[in-house]
Every structure is written in structure tokens, then in C-alpha cells.
Image: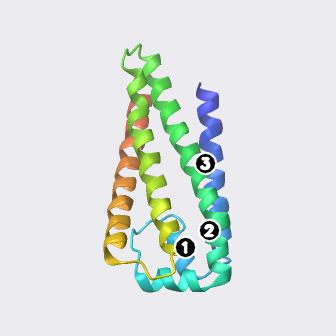
Amino acid sequence: MLITALVFGLLSFGILILMRLLSWTASSGVRQHVLERWGTYEPEELVKIRNSPKDKELYLSLLFPLDVFFMVAFGIFLALVSIGAANSMKSSCAIFGVVAPVLYVVADFTENCLLYRMLKAVTPPDESLIAAAHRITRAKWFLAGVASLQAILLFVFSKT
């Protein structure tokens, strides 16, 4: 299980690097939102991306699918590390190691769907949709942190 986890970890890291490299061919708005790292979706930025055929095409047809592959690979990596570490500690609750990674993937996918909808819409996104995207992004980062911390702690405690 550890080898499989490492493969998914390396795969997610490779996808992340590829997404960063591809984003540098686009405008600064696309570069900022590749990882949705700040969780800010200003209507003007989204309209600018939507109105640029190059940026919109890059974002919707290439970066979004790569982000879906990344979130799935990263979620599987976190789940496998958590389950493997819990199993090595002979824990009967090892299956619960998938809860935080699955919640992270759901939050990230929901965020992607909202962004996709905002970029494909004919009219500029309204404030409620942008506020929802902000909340989902914060939840995604919180859940990614919880899932990562869980995997790290379980791994460390399984070695002691």
C-alpha cells in the first residue's frame, strides 16, 4: 500500500508542477487562480479571464481537467497513507482514514464546478455565487490541511 501511496503522491506532485508551468503561459488572473490559493474571485478578474479566448480555453479545457486529476490523486494519496498507517498500528478504525480526504475532494470538486459555472456564464457572476466560491475554497483548504495532518500524524505514530 505504501508504494501505491507514493505513486499517487508523486503523480499529484507532477500534476501540480505541470499546472503551474502551464499557467505561466496565461494572464496573471489565471496564474493566481490555478491553485485557488487565495480564495478571491473578484468579478472583474473572472470577466477578464472569460473575455480572453486564450485564458478561457486554457483554464476550462486544460487546467480544470488537470485539477480534477490532481484532487483525485492527492485524495487517494492521503487516504492510502492514512489507512496504511492506521492498519500498521492494528487500528480497527482504519477505514475512517478516508473521511477527511474524501471531504477534501468533494470540496475541491464543488469549488471547480462553481468556477466553471462562473466562467461559462453569459452574465457576470453575482455576489452570492462568488461568496459561495470563497466559502468552498476556505473549506477545501481547511479539509486539505486536516487530511494532510491526519496522514502525517498517523504515519508518524505508526513508526513509533
Residue at horizontal 42%, vertical 23%? Answer: 95
Sequence-earlier tag: 1 or 3 = 3
The three-letter code of the residue at mark 1 reads Lys
The image quarter in which residue 19 lies: bottom right
What is the crowding at mark 1: few (fewer than 14 residues within 10 Å), some, or many (at least 20)?
Answer: some
The vertical placement of 122 against 136, above or below, is: below
Whether 2 is drawn above or below 129: the answer is above
What residue appears at the point 60 percent right and 48 percent down from the top-left corner?
12
> Does the rendering let one see residue 160?
no
Structural distance between the alpha carbons of marks 1 and 2 = 9 Å
Instruction: Report the mark closest to the observer, 1 or 3.
Output: 1
Q: Is residue 132 left or right of residue 98?
A: left
Quadrant in the picture for residue 137: bottom left
What type is the residue that disc 3 sits on? Ser
In the rendered image, which quarter is residue 77 located in?
Answer: top right
Q: Secondary structure at mark 3?
A: helix
The residue beneath circle 1 is 120
Circles 1 and 2, Cβ within 8 Å, touching? The answer is yes
User: Which residue is at a point 54% across and 49% down the rendered structure image?
Assistant: 71
Mark 3, residue position: 12
